[in-house]
Amino acid sequence: MPAQRRPGMDHEHHEWSPISERGRLRWPDDARIAICVIINLEHMEWQSPPGSFQAGNLAGGSASRPFPDYARLSHREYGHRVGIFRVLDVLERHGIPPTVAMDALTATNYPYLVRHLSGRGCEFIGHGISVSRMITSNMTSEEEQGYIRESLDALNGATGNEAQGWLGPEYGESSRTPQLLASTGIRYVCDWVNDEQPFPMTTQEGELYALPIMWELDDVSALADRKVTIDRYQDMLTEAFDALYHDGAENGRVLTLHLHPWLIGQPFRIGYLDAALDYMTRRSGVWAAKGSDIIDWYRQHRPSS
């Protein structure tokens, strides 16, 4: 079906809204910037199930190898065994409550991690079934609806809580995903990276908001895909913060970081994340919060356009 041209994007999932024309958004205690850190815990299967889709440029290891690709599998498993604890310790040191995007296979097969993360006060959000099974428009509506339900049932059953947010594996969505998420009770989605503030999605059922990740600061996007050096990555984090902090004096901003413990949790990288977050949280006017807290505040206090 050809796109229908209208002001802004060629879809009806949300309105086009230039930030220069919006009302003033203020965070709690008149903070200039809200910081949210999403930790990604996703399972990579030895082989993708028949009919599923796995991103061709999936990071991990040095390059894709013939089955079984132990280098990639074990590289990613490092995050579940070692890296996650380093990342959690850094966030705790700087008073940043973690938001954890966890897929169904991690929730089911790593009960220790679920208990440990729950004990540290993490928020859990849906993250599909596995990184090996990405949502695409090749699914039927019934298949995608079943996929979302299966992933949420596994996560909610493991954690004992109803997930409020969603981040698709590899940011994957079909043209139906926002509507399907809203119909299941999901309140915010992190796949839309097109802003520096939360914004409402257009839904026929339920209420859904976007919590945009700063995609170019996603550690996989920067360190694995674009080969940014770790010292330059630290600079990118602090430079982005400075710009958002400056702009937040006039209109509040959100900095949502998406981190993978198998990558940023390596012993030679974690200190750079620590230093960057220390730089951010030492400033006044910074609100570090979970994803659901940011969306709750925005929902109640968002200005009229």
Image: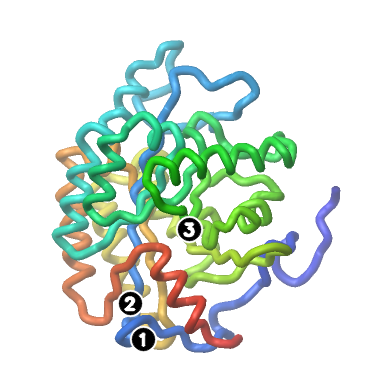
Label 2: few (<14), some (14–19) or many (≥20) C-alpha neighbours in 10 Å = many
Quadrant (top left/top right/bottom left/bottom right) for the C terminus: bottom right
Residue matched to label 1? 249
**Along the horizontal axis of the image, is 279 left or right of 157?**
left
| The one of 37 and 215 positioned closer to us in this rendering | 37
Q: Residues within 10 Å of mark 3 (few under 14, many from 20)?
A: many
Which mark is in front, 3 or 2? 3
Q: Residue at x 70, y 40 (%)?
A: 137
Extreme top residue here?
Answer: 67
Mark 1 and mark 2 in contact? Answer it, CB < 8 Å.
Answer: yes
Amino acid type, residue under disc 3 in the picture: Gln
Above or below, 14 against 32 in this view is: above
Name the one closer to the observer, 95 or 109. Answer: 109
3D distance between C-alphas at marks 1 and 3: 29 Å
Task: Provide residue 128's location: percent of width, then percent of height.
Answer: 51, 40
- Distance Cα–Cα, label 3 vs label 2: 27 Å
Display colour scheme = rainbow
Q: Earlier in the sequence, mark 1 or mark 3?
A: 3
Q: Residue at x 50, y 56 (%)?
A: 190
Residue wearing tag 2: 245
The residue wearing badge 3 is: 164
